[in-house]
């Protein structure tokens, strides 16, 4: 599974940055229902988050309604989400634990 930040447009015309999680083939698994709030443990971490959000502007804007419809259709056709839904914070915690457990 991989993730990135993406710009979304909702039905009222408002824009937000959200986390998007992908299969290895690039298909969207899910996205964060709440827009991203930038919060870092240090100025450097916050700057990294800002850089990742900036990269989202280089990608096409996604429509909340279109993505919701695509995910619903996948689910209706038995292509359900086989992954546990995790927040970016959860993914980072898992990756941090994996890194901590790597023998040196």
Image (cartoon, grey):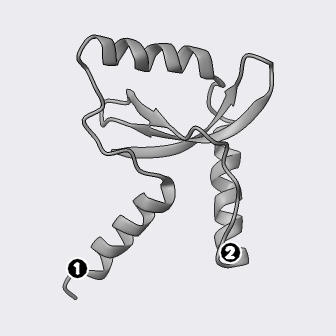
Residue appearing at x 38%, y 44% in the figure: 85
The residue furthest left is 103
Which of the image's four quarters has the N terminus?
Answer: top left
> Callout 1 environment at 10 Å: few (<14), some (14 to 19), or many (20+)?
few
Counting the numbered discs, the total is 2
Q: Residue furthest right?
A: 13
Quarter occupied by residue 7: top right
- Name the secondary structure under disc 2: helix
Question: Foreground: 89 or 3?
Answer: 89
Position of residue 93 measured from the top left corner of the image (x, y, whole percent): 41, 68
Q: Residue at x 43, y 60 (%)?
A: 90
Q: Is residue 102 left or right of residue 49?
A: left
Whether residues under marks 2 and 1 lie with C-beta atoms below 8 angstroms apart, the answer is no
Q: Write down the residue under mark 2.
A: 44
Point out residue 39 in the picture as x, y percentages from the top left corner: 69, 65
Local secondary structure at mark 1: loop
96 to the left or right of 82? right
Name the foreground residue: 33 vs 6.
33
Quarter of the image where the C terminus is located: bottom left
Establish if 66 lies above or below 30. above
Point out the tag, 2 or 1, that comes first from the N-terminus.
2
Q: Residues within 10 Å of mark 2 (few under 14, many from 20)?
A: few
Circle on res. 102: 1
Real-space CA distance between mark 2 and mark 1, rounded to the nearest whole angstrom:
25 Å
């Amino acid at each position: 599974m991989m993730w990135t930040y993406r710009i979304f447009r909702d039905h009222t015309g408002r824009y937000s940055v959200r986390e998007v999680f992908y299969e290895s083939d690039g298909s969207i698994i899910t996205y964060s229902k709440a827009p991203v709030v930038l919060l870092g443990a240090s100025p450097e971490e916050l700057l990294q988050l800002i850089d990742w959000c900036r990269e989202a502007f280089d990608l096409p804007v996604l429509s909340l309604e279109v993505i919701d419809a695509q995910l619903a259709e996948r689910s209706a056709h038995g292509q359900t989400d086989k992954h546990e839904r995790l927040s970016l914070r959860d993914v980072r915690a898992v990756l941090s634990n994996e890194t901590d457990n790597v023998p040196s």
